[in-house]
Image (spheres, rainbow, N blue to C red):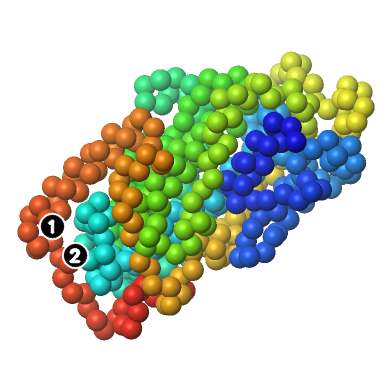
Amino acid sequence: MSRLINLYKTILTSAGLESDAQGRIYQKLAGESIPCTVGEKSLLLPTKEVLKDTDWTSAIAFHPLSENVARGESPIIKKLKELLLTRATRVLDGLAFQLLSMAANTQTHEKFSPAQLEYLTYLKDADGKMVDAYRKMIGSVTIDGKHRLINMYLKRSGTLNGTKYARLCITSLPILDKSDESERTLFGHKVRKRDFTSIPQLFEYILPGVNENAYSYGTHNKTAPFFHALMLSYLNIAKQLNQRVEMFKEHLVDVDDLLIDVSFEAEMGCLSDMRDEIPPLEGNQGDVENKAPDTTASVAKPGNAPASTPKPVESKPSAPAKSGGAREWNTISGNRGHGNGYQPANTGWSNAAYAPPPSGRAAAMQKQRQVAYNNSPWNQGQNAGWGNPQPQNTGWNQGGSNGGGV
């Protein structure tokens, strides 16, 4: 297996996908393997066998390293962004739901370590009704569009934290903007004041500094810069999500599904070394943005490609397919049945294996910890409210320890 194909496989694994011996790529959804497509074309790994024998009228290769720096986002980059957002959204939702469920069930609090107890300061008013409000809200989340939980925006040049870059991936959580404050709604659902305040605070706890560009990434990379910026921003998010999952893993259900594979990181600084392993393939170079024709890179065609490499057909640019809803992501982000008994870990805040790299995010987390401690009940006496008995007539926390199911 070539080095580049191995990198592509690790990226697909990180996004929750798999491939078979024929190079066909599948998305794992609700225990099923669903063929991954771009438009109406099957998505394939560009192995030697695939390049030699494939009918490209009904298929497209996954080869984002083909990116042409003079063009815009390619259909493959758009699809990759959709897949990465799907994976990150599923993990963020699965973790947030379980943390909220445990916060609403005071019987679980005595099992928490001091480091884990910190998150309860963000959910002092959590109860069964808040869990129900979260479930309704998250049911309206989509991967793109108005109700997206995570936003990743690729930009052709700009400034990030005072530095200019050729390409950027700007990452944020729209829910933290609270644009519906006057109506007090979350993703179109009317909620109580405590829900409107606490649920966004939970997401801010999981991804501190997210709307201050703590996870955004800028690059001057000359090899596939859109691809590079997208993957490194996703890596920032994945590492922070992994850190939170590791912190609470002893009390979480489906931990393996919540941990994101980040083994692709080691190769992201070596893209230029692999670029020539496979010739540029159409559908991966990028959309033309009313620019003069570029002649610096050739696309694999019968006249100039290796003899064993046929010409893939360019996929017509189209709007990404809607990816929200239960089918695409919400049905797999953790088992939420009453019998699971969500139970948090002793790995602590600074687990070295998943500690985020020094950046604006680290400063945001440090500030967050100080604020949490200053407001914590163990620093001010037991009057904060989260340790007091919760209402017992909601039907949510009677007879079980996890607080409700789907």
Q: Callout 2, which amino acid? A: Trp
| Residue 386 tag number | 2
* Label 1: which secondary element: helix
Q: Callout 1, which amino acid? A: Pro
Real-space Cα separation, disc 1 to disc 2, in angstroms: 8 Å
Disc 1 residue crowd, few under 14, some 14–19, many 20+, Cα 10 Å: many
Asked which quadrant contains residue 132, the reply is bottom left
| Residue 377 tag number | 1
What percent of the width, then of the height, locates residue 21? 79, 48
Asked which quadrant contains residue 378, the reply is bottom left
Residue at the top extreme of this rendering? 296
Which residue is found at the position 77% from the left and 28% from the top? 278
What percent of the width, then of the height, locates residue 294? 73, 18
- Tag count: 2
* Label 2: which secondary element: loop
> Which is more N-terminal, label 2 or label 1?
1
Q: Is residue 104 above or below residue 181?
A: below
304 and 49: which is toward the camera = 49
Q: Judge left or right: residue 318 versus residue 197.
A: right
Residue at the left extreme of this rendering? 381
Q: Is residue 92 above or below residue 209?
A: below
109 and 150: which is toward the camera = 109
Which residue is found at the position 75% from the left and 36% from the top? 1
Residue 200 in view (yes/no): no
